[in-house]
Amino acid sequence: NALTGLANAWFDSIPLMLISGQVNTKDKRREYSFRQFGFQEIQAVPMAEPIVKKAYDIELGMDYVNLFDEAYKIAFTGRKGPVYLDFPINVGREIIEVDDVIVPVELESPAPFDAAPYIDQLMAAKKPIIIAGGGIKQLGLREEFRKLVNLLQIPVVPTMPGVDLLPTGAPFRVGFLGGTARREAGIVLKNTDFVLSLGTRMCNKAIGYNHDDFIPKATKFIRVDLDTTEFERQLKDCEEDVVADLTSFMRSALEHAEKIKGMHDHSHWVNAVVEMQKLMERVDMTFGNELVKHFTELIPEKSFITLDVGNNMIYGEQSAVIKSETRVYESAGLGSMGYSIPAAMGIAVGTRVPTYVVTGDGGAQMNIQELNTISKKHLPVKVLLLNNHVLGHIILFQDHYLEHRRTATTEDGDDYYSCDFAAIAKAYGIRSYKIRNIEELDQYKIELNDSEPLLIEVEFEDCSMLPNIHGGLDPLTNGPELPEGLPDKVIDIMKGK
């Protein structure tokens, strides 16, 4: 059951120590060729090995204390990720003697790095940008990054996991990167001449599968990453790969940015980006976008939001109001439907503050049984459930690639079924409401801010996700047609006219 969680942690570089139970050592299959020896035995370690930094097959007599220390260091050293420890039941029953005081594990400090030459190149460009990924917040560098942006004063395009690095309306923030993003980020990427990438592996989901369409006017693309395996995939001819610990790079970049503060003026470029975003602000806004936007306007300044996988995730990434202390979590690399509710539960247990879920009728049914735990533990989890009675993101794929052959995605086809989620939540003992209009959310503002569970189901028919531009194509000429004259205005603005 934990393999999905391990895979999610592996792809999103989340440090995690997972301990599982295994059959008695004498009941393990070991070298035999038959399928199973012990009851409920499974070859868990070989299954986990491709998606963890290290997997331990625990045996009797091991130095368990030092083993835990080693596992912790591996999870948190270098590029973070999960480790897995598989404990046979007889080992778990062992009584061992340990010191009363457990000394905290000390992690090695990253080696210093000189980022000054790269910052100088960035600032010498005419139209520079930073692409900022989730690695920045994974390392606890959010505030340092915000300081750096305020010093450099150039546009920032976050990736999906980095969407909460800068608040909505911040002067240098431009949407987010990817084929499911709004058009503004794509327009900036088509016009930039210099890119610095921090805290992101630049996956194809973000940049498109045809790399020629990605940053076509850039003369330099600097990728900073500690994991050298990511550089096995060269993205652009103008690419320079920089092997560096992001913490060390950020510290050095901040120090140098202070020294060169005010020496470079990119106001013409920044103003063009800001003006372009104002023109595009109301384009492609669907019911789902408006719903999530208003929902997030009603929640506190300091809030945790978990997004599921599907159109609901895209609405959240595109339109959630990110406040200064908002934190957003999603299954970015694995894209695992059902992620949002259990993720919110973990956050609620750890923080005891209200945690907000945005999910759809498909993802919610993956882990709907967790509503019982939320109810019994009185966890402050608030669920906004978008029920349009279809697997909306999947039918977009079916329509685009399979000539509108929809299978197991709509109720019309008699092979997919939604349900009355408000009634199910009520049966579990959770306050639940069913609405159809965005304005109806206002009457639940008090419940959205208290410490008890809540589920609001919103029924609607729209399943569109816009602009849905595939493969890094031109955002002005692809996707739904823009209002007459708007593309020309945007082109003129980006040219500086």
Image (cartoon, helix red, strand yellow):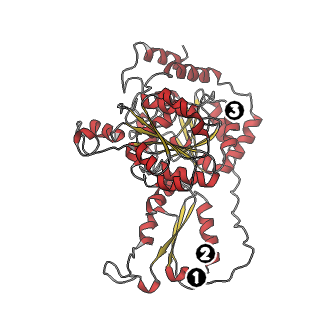
Disc with the residue nearer the chain's start (1 vs 2): 1
Density class for disc 3 (Cα within 10 Å; few <14, some 14-19, many ≥20) is some
Q: Which amino acid does label 1 sit on?
A: Met
**Image position of 275 with respect to 472: above or below:** above
Residue drawn 70% across and 47% down? 114
Residue drawn 46% across and 84% down? 25
The quadrant of the image that shows the N terminus is bottom left
Labelled pair 1, 3 in contact (Cβ < 8 Å): no
Q: Which amino acid does label 2 sit on?
A: Leu
Element on which disc 2 rests? helix
Element on which disc 1 rests? loop
- Position in image of residue 463 (x %, y %): 35, 33
Kindly identify which residue carries mark 1: 62
Disc with the residue nearer the chain's start (3 vs 2): 2
Q: Which amino acid does label 3 sit on?
A: Asn
Kindly identify which residue carries mark 2: 67
Disc with the residue nearer the chain's start (1 vs 3): 1
The quadrant of the image that shows the C terminus is top right
Query: In the depicted view, which residue is nearer to us: 377 or 177?
Result: 377
- Position in image of residue 46 (x %, y %): 42, 71
Labelled pair 3, 2 in contact (Cβ < 8 Å): no
**Image position of 378 with respect to 24: above or below:** above
Task: Say which of marks 1 and 3 sits in front.
Answer: 1
Kindly identify which residue carries mark 3: 150
Density class for disc 2 (Cα within 10 Å; few <14, some 14-19, many ≥20) is some
Structural distance between the alpha carbons of marks 1 and 3: 51 Å
Structural distance between the alpha carbons of marks 3 and 2: 44 Å
